[in-house]
Image (cartoon, rainbow, N blue to C red):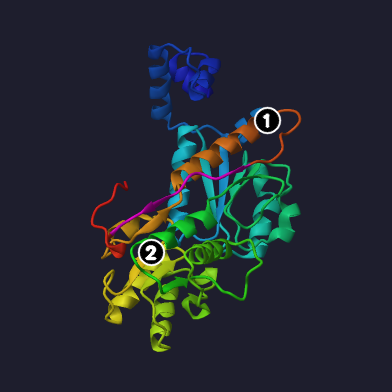
Amino acid sequence: MHDVARVAGVSIKTVSNVINDYPHVRPGTRDRVNEAIEQLDYRPNLSARGLRSGRTGVIGLAVPSLRENYFAELADSVIRAAEKRGLGVMVEQTSGQRESELRAVSSSRPRFLDGMLFSPVGLGQGDADALAIDSPLVLLGERIFGGPTDHVTMHNTSSSQAAVEHLLEIGRRRIALVGADFRIRNEASSANLRLHGYLKALEEAGIEHDESLVRPTPMSQWNRAGGATAIHLMIEEGVEFDAVFALNDTLGLGVLRALREEGRRVPDDVAVIGFDNIDESKYSVPSMSTVDTGRDEIARIAVDRLIERINEKGERRPPETFKPDFRIVKRESTGFTSTDDD
């Protein structure tokens, strides 16, 4: 900073004001300082700044897997939301392992961040106390309810019910579900919450559920291969179905591939709807109907809430839960050629 001040012909305080984007610096002075910064390739020492201010300007985001489209796109949404608030984001991948998720919130790493957004899948309700850390923390996803942190989640049950109702509205009655297991019904996971919505839609339509239509796929296999395998097995076993609700879009892409390989036409023979509205679902052939859960809004709310917690002084407010609105995006896989999405 001494060197920048010397080259620009200003005080060190003025350099600091420009770096911190204080509004009262005159445009000509700001330009000279920025030119000196570029000339000297100066980079502020975030660690030193953090020691003085107690802030680093960086938040963390811990997600299960960046190979999964949804979490990659969620990370992109979080980074863009944070940039608008002047923050950087450090992204960590936990691989959905309980031990890795515990390390993400219990190790020394949060101390070098102003706060963290955390999307666990390995932790359960019994791990709620592990979230009671000193650093500001906002939970994403479905795994833990009523914990000590703010929680930004989605309408898993009601949006899944709406997805199945869409299939019922176009005349489908043998609706398969890919991605959940009837044997695991008491767990607060996205799979079980979405399964509950599926069952509720059938019940309200007066249709008795058929367990042979519910195909288990571990969340670690919520991918194309998992979706394709489920379809091949159902057809091999002679299970009749005229629609598929895939619990995420990546499973749905595998479903579309398997149906094509099996000679089933979409949507004529089998209608398909997914969940998450990842970018690829719009460009699959056929384009895939899906549930848009409001990913950008989830990211915006989560970043805003984390900043509020970071800035909080004195007694902390009780934790809150937020759920953005969802919508059903109707595309070719359920017989629609146009939509208002995007």
Magenta stretch, residue numbers: 321-331
Q: Is residue 324 magenta?
A: yes
Location of residue 334 (image quadrant): bottom left
Q: Residue at x 47, y 49 (%)?
A: 75
Residue 158's spot in the image, x, y percent? Answer: 51, 54
Does residue 262 appear left or right of residue 212 in this picture? left
Q: Quadrant of residue 37?
A: top left
Residue reaching furthest bottom?
237
Q: Nearer the viewer, residue 49 or 293?
A: 293
In percent of width and height, residue 131 lies at 71, 50
Q: Which mark is residue 167?
A: 2
Q: Secondary structure at mark 2?
A: helix
Q: Type of residue at label 2?
A: Leu
Q: Residue 58: x, y in percent? A: 56, 39
Q: What's the amino acid at mark 1?
A: Glu
- When asked about the image quadrant of residue 192, the answer is bottom right
Point 42% across, 13% down: residue: 29
Q: Answer whether residue 107 is visible to the viewer in this image.
A: no
Residue in the foreground of this view, choosing between 161 and 75? 161
Which of the marked residues, 1 or 2, is nearer the chain's N terminus?
2
Mark 2 surroundings: few (<14), some (14-19) or many (≥20) residues within 10 A: many
In the rendered picture of this protein, how many numbered marks are placed on residues? 2
Disc 1 versus disc 2: distance between alpha carbons?
46 Å
Query: In the rendered image of this protein, does residue 52 appear above or below residue 263?
Result: above
Q: Looking at the image, can residue 167 be seen?
A: yes
Residue 225: % across, % down:
42, 75
Q: Secondary structure at mark 1?
A: loop
- Foreground mark, 1 or 2, reads 2
Give the side of residue 2 with respect to residue 232, left or right.
right
Is 303 in the magenta? no
The circle on residue 312 is 1
